[in-house]
Image (cartoon, grey):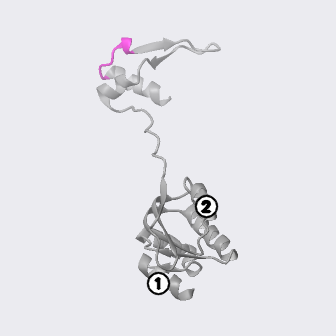
Amino acid sequence: MDIISGALRAGIGRGLFQGDFEVLAGSDGEPATPRLRFYQILILRFGFLGYAPPLMETAKLEVQHMPGTENGCLVQVLNGKLCLETVHSFVQTMRQEQAKDLVLDMSGVSFLDSSGVGALVSCFVNRQHAGKTTALAGLTRQGSAVLQVSGVMKLIPTYPTVEEAVRSRSQSA
């Protein structure tokens, strides 16, 4: 018994009217089966059969340039989710970046998954091969935990604040 047939049986016993359904002819000799004309009937009257939930909101990641620092270190502020849905545009943006020293302010990253970790590693490695530096600053608890478990914190320099990251970039230059 599918969910609609079960709901119909329960609904008819709870006061739905035969006019709320239409009978569809069976195929290949199967008997005709009642189906709902409008699913809203069960929802409005009984609230036990609903539509599929709306699709999840698309993840977004904004990358904003912070005003320049005195030592030429570029700071980019990330806001949103660094996840499977956003890594492609993130990697493209990072590959175009020409600054010698880059600090990613991660304080606005609300979610980081393994795809995001891979994108950060890719950015770090590509920049390192080109003789450029990358550092992370302001990690959230979730971001810090993900990077710690993955071992990436041993690879990419991380700092508690953007100011400390910029200061360390200027000292290494």
Q: Is residue 61 above or below residue 129?
A: above
Q: Residue at x 50, y 85 (%)?
A: 168
- Residue sitting farthest toward the front: 70
The answer to whether one can see residue 161 in this image is no
The answer to whether one can see residue 170 in this image is yes
Mark 2 surroundings: few (<14), some (14-19) or many (≥20) residues within 10 A: some
Where is residue 109 shown, x and y percent of the image? 45, 63
In the foreground, 54 or 76 = 76
Q: Is residue 122 above or below residue 158?
A: above
In the foreground, 116 or 94 = 94
Where is residue 57 shown, x and y percent of the image? 45, 46
Image marks 2 and 1: residues in contact by CB distance under 8 Å: no
Q: Residue at x 37, y 11 (%)?
A: 19
Where is residue 51 shown, x and y percent of the image? 42, 32
Residue 167 disc label: 1
Q: Is residue 100 left or right of residue 19?
A: right
- Residue sitting farthest toward the bottom: 171
Q: Residue at x 48, y 57 (%)?
A: 62
Compute the Cα span from label 2 to label 1: 25 Å
Q: Residue at x 40, y 27 (%)?
A: 7
Q: How many marks?
A: 2
Label 1: element kind = helix
Where is residue 146 shown, x and y percent of the image? 50, 70
Question: In the image, is residue 68 part of the stretch drawn in magenta?
Answer: no
Q: Quadrant of the C terminus?
A: bottom right
- Which amino acid lies under the numbered mark 2 shown in the image of this protein? Val
Residue 119 disc label: none
- Which amino acid lies under the numbered mark 1 shown in the image of this protein? Arg
Q: Is residue 70 above or below residue 41?
A: below
Q: Which residues are magenta?
A: 14-20
Q: Which residue is mark 2?
A: 91
Pointer 2 or 1: first along the chain: 2
